[in-house]
Image (spheres, coloured by chain):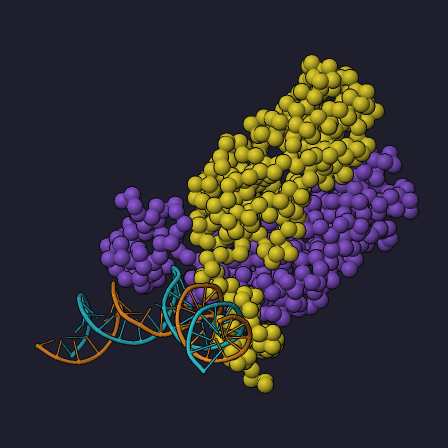
Chain colours: A purple, B yellow, C cyan, D orange
Amino acid sequence: MRQDPSPSSGSSITLEDVARAAGVSRSTVSRVINGIRNVDPAIQETVRRAIATTGYVPNHAARSLVTRRTGAIALVVSGAGSEGADAPFPGQVFADPFFGRVVGGIVSFLRPRGIHPILMFAETAEIHAQVLTHLRHGNADGALLVSTHAADPLPRLLVEARVPAVLFARPAEPIPISYVDVDHRAGAKLAADHLVARGRRRVATVSGPLDVPAGQSRLTGFLDAMAAHGHAYVPHAEGGFTHHSGEAAMERLLTEQPGLDGVFVANDLMAQGALVALRHHGRRVPEDVAVVGFDDSSAATACRPPLTTVRHPVEDMAGEMARMLLAHIEQPGRPATSKIFDPVLVVRDSA
Amino acid sequence: MRQDPSPSSGSSITLEDVARAAGVSRSTVSRVINGIRNVDPAIQETVRRAIATTGYVPNHAARSLVTRRTGAIALVVSGAGSEGADAPFPGQVFADPFFGRVVGGIVSFLRPRGIHPILMFAETAEIHAQVLTHLRHGNADGALLVSTHAADPLPRLLVEARVPAVLFARPAEPIPISYVDVDHRAGAKLAADHLVARGRRRVATVSGPLDVPAGQSRLTGFLDAMAAHGHAYVPHAEGGFTHHSGEAAMERLLTEQPGLDGVFVANDLMAQGALVALRHHGRRVPEDVAVVGFDDSSAATACRPPLTTVRHPVEDMAGEMARMLLAHIEQPGRPATSKIFDPVLVVRDSA
DNA sequence: GACACGTAGGAGAGCGCTCTCCAAAAGAGT
DNA sequence: ACTCTTTTGGAGAGCGCTCTCCTACGTGTC
């Protein structure tokens, strides 16, 4: 036995070898492995034993050559690479803990199915093309796309190239592509209701970038809800979903309305920045100013005080994205669908 | 022309089609594409034109079936999944901005070479096996491994399975595997020298977990450097490299030595936590207590005050990892090598 | 002009797998 | 007992590519 190829040595054991060892044909071994059609239980057992003793591992390339499936999916993080003054360094986006949660949700769903995502960052147009080529080369069966910017052309390119894809968040332009999203308006209303219930009368808001649907909807949802509570005018300052932009926006708000006692900040990273600005101006949170964030990212609990925030069920959404993509890959003609998730208010100490 | 397969329709254009269009053989087209051997410039031009007009895209599966290369590499984030009381949720690790930088460095190096990493999380032994199987199926040519825990068995498993691999940070057990690392002792000395130069006399340290080489080296490096400055005894509290463990360790240190005026915290995330504890106890930073972190992660600049910290050239190290892995894939017999990077002190406001 | 030599292109044999087609065997209905 | 269906295993044709031969054709040498 010692001259035998050990199972750990670079596997050049093929189906043919297993078939010979089991005394059956290649077809039968293939059927046992793929669990297709009926195979006599006794033969199945023999084949399984042969697979174990030979240490056979299927060759992925050969399989996908004939099935025309790679069994891989791409996770594309796309943006315009113009995150304020930040360097457009790939992986920069992971500074936002939100992406960690997206990745976690996707992996949780995919891993039990034996799929591991291929990570791609696409900041520039040149790289968009490269990503597209990669996908068309058959390196992945489909793509999960998380855009950081509204003007992202990739969703459209993906649709045109007929690459199965699912987006996180509704695309800015109306195109036939599946996506998941959270009900931003409902989340903003949750924040408004909470602030009013806490007795706050001079409320303001730090919005996200208004060219992004999420930024837009959170703002209008908040303003509408406040209007329903009788507050016709609510000051707002626009931020860019980053820590520093939140801090700067809060500064502007304090200049405009020094007497404010409540603020809704459109994401936690900005809220963290807002907290810094408030402290700098001697405001106590929540005594002087109540702060409500959005996302329930890990930044929310890292803050002092911990943030009251609107919980985006990111992991569930990411899992659903993966589920939808798999369905699209399974049935190529499937029409685009969307799924909107309900947010939840998580009450902590900041409001 | 309108009945022709349009370039954007699911590519079933093969080498054969291109060869026919160019009036040459399949071999010649292959040679042009792979730039191997001499091909008449005129014919090359004809072939390129044919490729463009047919919209040909090479089939990756077919190619890797014969070359026995996938052209893919795996990025494995491995740990024991017992990060304190945190849930072992995949992607959890991305809460640490450090990983974002690792990913960024890897992608920066790999992307120009047309390679996109396959992301895998391996928290449990069961998943280690799954990852190994995946690798042996030929889903990737090699692996880049970032462990969060010292007891990680994956490096050894990878070596045994003869999967080309490179680690981020020296393995706890001595095994023949390539790695990159930072000179932790030198970094800790930088911190000690700076604290002493700033005139601090009652210095303490929050160390990382002592079963991790990085935690160990940073502590001993710091203690040795302080001893060289005449400080025989330096109190220390052990943390777990997380925000909360840093806060807790700082609390303990303040109980043991209320009069301390300087502290070296073994990573920025813990330093951020330490800042919270110090503020809670009414200490001003840097006036009352000078704080030096380690890593120069984005947490360092998000803090108030911004952290003076030891910069780990993470992106360079990650890029080097990828370079080493490609070399190992290129020359399978290549002996394991390591590369140690020098850290740099980044002076901000905290010390 | 006969020979060797170097170079460019073509032919064709696989790489390891899936899957359709067939044949053989087994059961069902009359 | 015969035909008709159903079940189960084998044969073999590719999937699209690379790469090793092999042939044809200059070019150089004596």
Residue depicted at x 56% and y 84%: B3
The answer to which quarter of the image holds residue B54 is bottom right
Residue depicted at x 79% and y 52%: A84
* Any part of residue A213 in sight: no
| Front residue of this view, candidates A349 and B332 | B332
Q: Position of residue B129 (x, y in %)?
A: 44, 44
Tag count: 0
Q: Position of residue A8 (x, y in %)?
A: 39, 45
- The quarter of the image holding the C terminus of chain A is top right
For residue B224, above or below residue B312: above
For residue A62, above or below residue A281: below
Q: Position of residue A49 (x, y in %)?
A: 29, 50
In the picture, measured across the screen, residue B222 lies left or right of residue A4, that is right
The answer to which quarter of the image holds residue B341 is top right
For residue C9, above or below residue B62: below
- The quarter of the image holding the N terminus of chain A is top left
In the picture, measured across the screen, residue A102 lies left or right of residue C20, that is right
Q: Position of residue A253 (x, y in %)?
A: 87, 46
* Any part of residue B153 in sight: yes
